[in-house]
Image (cartoon, grey):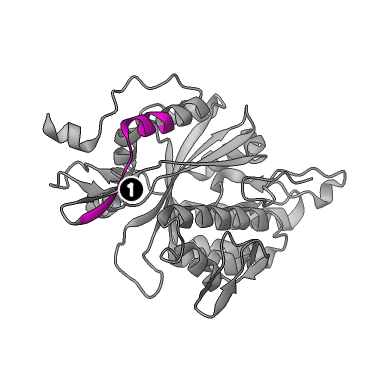
């Protein structure tokens, strides 16, 4: 039986079956965005496994990020781990530029507490990005400033902001999100507010089936939401959770091939296929409960630009919450505002 997450959606869990022929364990290493099934027997299993391995190999890209701990040791010892989930606006609405990471979520995966926590970082969060030449920047531009090594700078910037280890990263473009939703034949959600957009009426609390295009529009809408970017983040996590739940029910080879096809060219990560197998084997229980948190800031105008500025106490709270989920001691860092840092 499925357990519910913060959005009232069924959370993906590794189900059990008395009939082994019908059992399809989940390759949970793709975490929340994608859960690809590996069958358990015969030609079907071999074909799915082989296609998955080849596709994942194409998505692998290491970074030069300064990792704060030995990630191989973390997985081998079955310790909780973190992954920075990033969504770029490249590939959506006809865009072809590198884009910025308008979605940034730190996922902490803890098999002991049987919980995965998704902590959102607002895209306009004020930070200082090393090498940018700017005293003040929005965190979503770290990926852009990094150029071909954008993931490295994004990971380092998040680690510096919150004093938390980022063990892995996963980057997906928003055009890919649309294709992924279509590959699982759409998703069902209960809108968090009522609005009309691009010919679709979304009514708060009333379940609606969304195509890839509609899901993308639902996650991108910001101006009609009284919560602004914070509301958008909640809707993004709602769609991510819906994709995860729907992906677990995909049980035909044709569906798997389509889902794998959407990954190729739309996602990069430093999780290897072997890492994903390890996560599937040892961390499945962490998908039983999906919780959410966010780094709350205050809208502040700085030199004509609007930023979200979190207080020192808020950065410390989020840092320690993430560190707690990872089984680490509280941070000893003296969190200060960017203005305080620049005045030194």
Camera-nearest residue between 203 and 107? 203
Does residue 53 appear to the left or right of 303 in the view shown? Answer: right
Q: Is residue 107 above or below residue 87?
A: above
Whether residue 64 is visible: no
Is residue 218 one of those drawn in magenta? no
Q: Position of residue 73 (x, y in %)?
A: 47, 25
Q: Position of residue 72 (x, y in %)?
A: 46, 30
**Based on the displayed image, in which of its 4 quarters is residue 64 positioned?**
top left
Total marks shown come to 1
Expressed as whole percent of the image width and height from the top left, the position of residue 343 reads 12, 33
**Few, some or many residues within 10 Å of mark 1 (<14, 14–19, 20+):** many
Q: Please give the range of residues in magenta.
A: 305-318
Q: Nearer the viewer, residue 79 or 292?
A: 292
- In the foreground, 223 or 179: 223
Query: Residue, x 49% and y 69% (percent of image)?
Result: 217
Residue 108 locus on image (x, y percent): 51, 36
Residue named by callout 1: 151
| Residue depicted at x 47% and y 29% | 321
Q: For the N terminus, which image quadrant?
A: top right
């Amino acid at each position: 039986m499925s357990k519910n997450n913060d959005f009232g959606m069924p959370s993906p869990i590794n189900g059990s079956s008395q009939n082994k022929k019908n059992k399809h364990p989940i390759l949970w290493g793709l975490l929340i965005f994608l859960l690809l099934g590996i069958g358990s027997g015969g030609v079907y299993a071999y074909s799915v496994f082989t296609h998955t391995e080849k596709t994942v190999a194409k998505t692998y890209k290491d970074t030069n990020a300064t990792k704060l701990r030995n990630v191989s040791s973390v997985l081998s010892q079955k310790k909780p781990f973190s992954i920075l989930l990033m969504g770029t606006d490249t590939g959506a609405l006809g865009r072809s530029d590198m884009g910025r990471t308008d979605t940034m979520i730190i996922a902490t995966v803890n098999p002991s507490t049987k919980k995965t926590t998704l902590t959102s970082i607002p895209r306009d969060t004020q930070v200082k990005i090393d090498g940018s030449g700017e005293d003040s920047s929005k965190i979503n531009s770290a990926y852009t400033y990094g150029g071909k090594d954008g993931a490295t700078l994004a990971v380092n910037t998040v680690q510096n902001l919150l004093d938390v280890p980022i063990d892995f990263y996963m980057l997906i473009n928003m055009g890919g999100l649309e294709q992924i939703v279509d590959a699982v034949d759409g998703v069902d959600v209960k809108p968090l507010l009522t609005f009309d957009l691009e010919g679709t009426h979304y009514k708060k609390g009333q379940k609606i089936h969304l195509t890839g295009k509609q899901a993308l529009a639902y996650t991108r809408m910001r101006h009609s939401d009284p919560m602004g970017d914070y509301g958008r983040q909640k809707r993004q996590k709602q769609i991510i959770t819906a994709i995860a739940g729907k992906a677990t029910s995909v049980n035909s080879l044709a569906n798997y091939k389509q889902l794998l096809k959407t990954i190729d060219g739309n996602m990069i990560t430093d999780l290897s296929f072997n890492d994903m197998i390890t996560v599937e084997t040892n961390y499945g229980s962490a998908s039983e409960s999906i919780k959410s948190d966010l780094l709350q800031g205050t809208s502040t105008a700085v030199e004509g630009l609007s930023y979200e500025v979190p207080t020192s106490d808020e950065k410390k709270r989020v840092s320690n919450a993430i560190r707690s989920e990872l089984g680490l001691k509280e941070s000893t860092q003296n969190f200060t505002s960017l203005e305080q840092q620049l005045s030194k």
